[in-house]
Image (cartoon, rainbow, N blue to C red):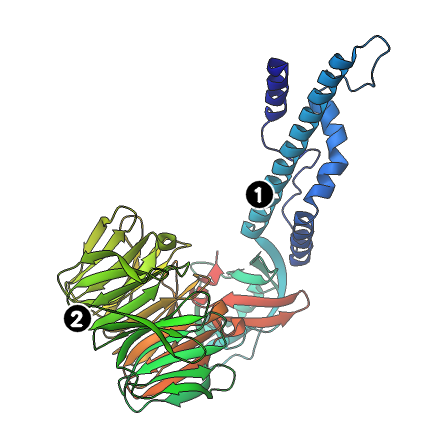
Amino acid sequence: MCTVALAMLLCVAGPPARCAGVESPPPPYTIESARARLQYLKDEEGRVEEWVEKNCEKEFAARLPGLDREPRRPKEKAAAFKEREMRVRMALSGVKASLRQERKEWLLKERKNLLSAGIREMLPARLGPYDADREEYPLLLGFGWPAGLSVKLRVPEEFRKIFELRLIGKIPALFRLNDRGEAFLLSLWRFWKEKDPVRPRLDLSPPGPRLVWQGAHDSWVTSVAFRPDGAQVLSAGADGTLCAWDVATGNRVFLLDNAELALSVAYCPDGMTFVTGGADSVLRVRDAESGRELWSASADGRILSVAYGPDGRYIAAGDGSGKVRVWNVQSRKEAASADLKEAVWSVFFTGGGTGFVAGGEGNAVILWNLLYNRQTWRREFDWPVYSVASEPGRGLIAVGGGGTRVVVLQEKDGSVVWSADMSGETRSLRFDPSGNQLAGGGSGYAVKVFAAETGLLRWTAEIGSPIRSVAFGPGGTKLAVGSSDFSVRLFEVAEEERVVAAFWSAGRIYLERGTEQSLFRP
């Protein structure tokens, strides 16, 4: 009986992954058809079990035609019937499991194909009044350019008449959808020939983030952190105070005078506590609601950086003696340590809490594996490292310091992914919770936000003084900035401000910042 049952299960598991009775549709021809298809796939994800029940009988018969499902025959013994019935139940369960997996894989594949597909649409377009002094035409689309973007086509006077004939009233455009069904403009057809003396000039004025409110300490703001629920921002000042700010109003929730000169602060992922690292070489864990001290631990030198692990079980601290210590929050005892020999300015957990990345005065960044308590890799720089940040979803590590560039590395081996100019030393770096953006600031007097994967500069916010610390709120739409002018600033960056948008009959259309320079393609 076991041999027969095993053979039946192998038979069920045999067919390759597919989606029974369903063929992939052709690529979408319009934005609206693509949106409808995306909505269908989202709806079907919640109806997988219903689909399996609907198709299991037909697939059972097709996959296992030789399996007898008839009721008990007159001369069939009870034991034989029970064995046959058991084989049918096992086979049916196997078919359902196979169908369930196939359906999920098919839906995932279809969504991936849809979101990567290019969608071509014809857009109404015309030329505006010719500027004879500049020898330029403004290009006007039927739905209007995205906000802040202007396109001027430089056309010599002697070429005007020929050029006007090139534009026939519509331009083929290429779009793609994102997971929310938003349409992004990828390119427009270049309706002039390569040899034609036409030069496009595209100007996109970046609006930058919106300042929501501004608070102040009586000295430098040394560190800022967002509470995980997004309700409060915590700031520490060189005046020895700790202050919690209400994100919605900018009002103080609590102020601790003469608490300590905290050089770094970080919230626990559950938002119930926060940790501070002080110039007095003491690490303190405090209640998030009141700031009351719960417990403390000592280091060998000034604690320059603190970080909570992603599950809240561990706290890491880098100090002026060159050591990184990891404490177990529950036992309040030291669980691991590493000696970098030089002052550690920044530490951050990686790999879901299985390791940490750290850097400092030794002009190097190390990745430390906590499971084996050893160094995984080390990368040298020409300048001291003042800030590191980790993005586990994409396996990225950002590094900044005494140089004028931010460098993003692969977590697995420390290889360089990209680097970008910061116009001065970098004192603080942070990825947003989604991992799509990297914010940094320092002596360049401005916060710069980059696309995490490519290093494309998305926007810049001028502060006017050196920046000491930055922190993203949940969703990446708010950014707290602490600076040397004693100020705590909260900026809001909505999706519409990270990209520029326009309205059209087919809905809102977006253009990612930075892609405007490659807008016209043959």
Which residue corresponds to the image point at 19% horizontal and 73% vertical from the top-left?
Answer: 302
Label annotation for residue 301: 2
Residue situated in front as seen by the camera: 488 or 118: 488
Horizontal relation, residue 89 to residue 145: left or right:
right
Q: Please give left or right for residue 139 compared with residue 351 in the image.
A: right
> Which callout, 2 or 1, points at the residue further toward the start of the chain?
1
Q: Is residue 82 left or right of residue 410?
A: right
Label 2 is placed on what type of residue? Gly
Residue 300 sits in which quadrant?
bottom left
- State the residue position of label 1: 109
Q: Residue furthest left?
A: 341
Helix, strand or loop at disc 1?
A: helix
Q: Nearer the viewer, residue 482 or 408?
A: 482
Q: Secondary structure at mark 2?
A: loop
Closer to the camera, 189 or 256? 256
Q: CA distance from mark 2 to mark 1?
A: 53 Å
Looking at the picture, how far across and down is residue 416, in whole percent? 27, 54
> Which image quarter holds the N terminus?
top right
Residue 197 appearing in the image: no
